[in-house]
Image (tube, helix red, strand yellow):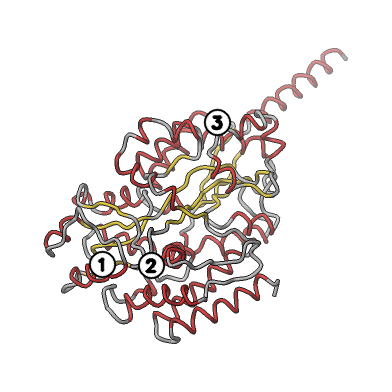
Amino acid sequence: MKKTALVCILIMLLSTTAMAAKPVTLRLFSPYFTEEPTGTLLRELVATWNGENPDIQIEVIAVPHSDRETKFRSLMMANQGPDIVAVPPGSLDNYYTSGYLLNLEPLIAATGGDGYKAQFTEVAQKAVSVDNDWYALPTWGGIHALYYNIDLFEQAGLDPNNPPETWSEFLEAAKILTTGDQYGYGMYGYRNEVSIRELLPWLVSNGTQLFNDDMTKATFADEKGIEAFTFFVELATKHNVVPPGVTTAGYNEVSLMFANEQVAMYQNAQWGRSKAHHDNPNIEGKFLVAPIPRPDNAESSAAVYVSVANAITTQCKQPEAAWKFLNYYTNDENLIRRNEVMGFLPARKAAAASPRVVGDPFIKGFIDLFPIANMRPRHARIQEINLALADALQAALLGIKTPEQALKDAELEVNGILRGN
């Protein structure tokens, strides 16, 4: 009898040990693994984690930006959602309203509460909060500026130490830089939010208030908005300083054209440097950045701050394990490494203040833009709003509508969205 009991106990212990030893596999959904050199570093971070944490393994689901929204929603609606999801700019409220994001407050409370939150920059904290509760972990941010090629400026007789500051100066430079197979400006015209991220500073710098204060009404199709939108669209349709096929040109296409010196100027955040170096190592040291040109009668330009976070989904069955990984994935050292490799501005204060970050003059150029930076509008249906604007941009670029009509139609559509239609 005693022998039987002892055998049973041993079997139970062995079974428990086997169960404890069985690794947890968490799926991480992210578009950033599809970009280089971002993807290489992120895969390295995941590989390091998997090697050091056999009990918690990370499986990456890498989906390009163009397909990420459809793919993520399809997985969640099929109850096959990932455990962790990268939250690109403008997506948090959408995911939150859909019920896809886990409230992180219990996990934060167990990790230090307000003291834990205080480790992050104020703007990063705001980007992940809904009614003061966090639904994602801040990771990195960025500000868009105008990239321009030093060699191409000099070859065209332009002074790279005096980049265009106003719209008229910008247009004149773009025309001079457009010759043969080389174009003055690379524009994102693809139907996604990246194109709208590029467009917004031009509208805001011209004095356009995109929405009313409580974001219940769109106001971007006012006189100033139409003026800015028309100027932007006509870079391609009237002045021909943008490469053909603009409505199919997304982030990867335009940044590659800049790296290969097919376009002399384009708009990107600080991560554009590492992307250019990866696409063409020979371009290193051949470009600078400047504020996005302002209207001729304006005192300053505008910039847009974008924030990227990582969240645990409501379908995650092991949130504590996911939380443990996320705190590794976004620790100071790994955020600094993101900055060194891709130029991402760290969301943690200590990392952002590191000499390895602020000691880089190129990065400091973007940090200096913070005083004119605007947070992107936040709304639960921001993706629909972005697509309405992207449709307007494409309709105007393709000549289906005039810029004025396209923007007015977009405002009507967006106001319907804001009313809950």
**Disc 1: which residue:** 169
Q: Which kind of residue does numbered mark 2 sit on?
A: Tyr
Q: Which kind of residue does numbered mark 1 sit on?
A: Glu
> Residues under labels 2 and 3: Cα distance?
42 Å
Residue nearest the viewer, comparing 328 with 386: 386
Residue ranking furthest to the top = 2
Question: In the figure, is residue 292 to the left or right of 88?
Answer: left
Give the residue at x 53% y 66%: 209
Whether label 2 touches label 3, CB < 8 Å: no
Q: Position of residue 175 (x, y in %)?
A: 21, 73
Residue 84's place in the image compared with 381, above or below, is above
- What is the number of the mark on residue 54? 3
Give the residue at x 46% y 71%: 191
Residue 75's place in the image compared with 404, above or below, is above
> Which of disc 3 and disc 1 is earlier in sequence?
3
> Residues under labels 1 and 3: Cα distance?
58 Å
Q: Quick one: SS at disc 2? A: loop
> Residues under labels 1 and 2: Cα distance?
21 Å
Q: Residues within 10 Å of mark 3 (few under 14, many from 20)?
A: some
Question: In the figure, is residue 344 to the left or right of 171?
Answer: right
Q: Which kind of residue does numbered mark 3 sit on?
A: Pro
Q: Position of residue 376 (x, y in %)?
A: 52, 57
- What is the number of the mark on residue 336? none
Question: In the figure, is residue 419 to the left or right of 159?
Answer: right
- Comparing marks 1 and 2, which lies closer to the viewer? 1
Give the residue at x 31% y 64%: 166
> Which of disc 2 and disc 1 is earlier in sequence?
1
**Disc 2: which residue:** 188
Residue nearest the viewer, comparing 371 with 142: 371
Question: In which quadrant of the rendered image does the N terminus lie?
Answer: top right
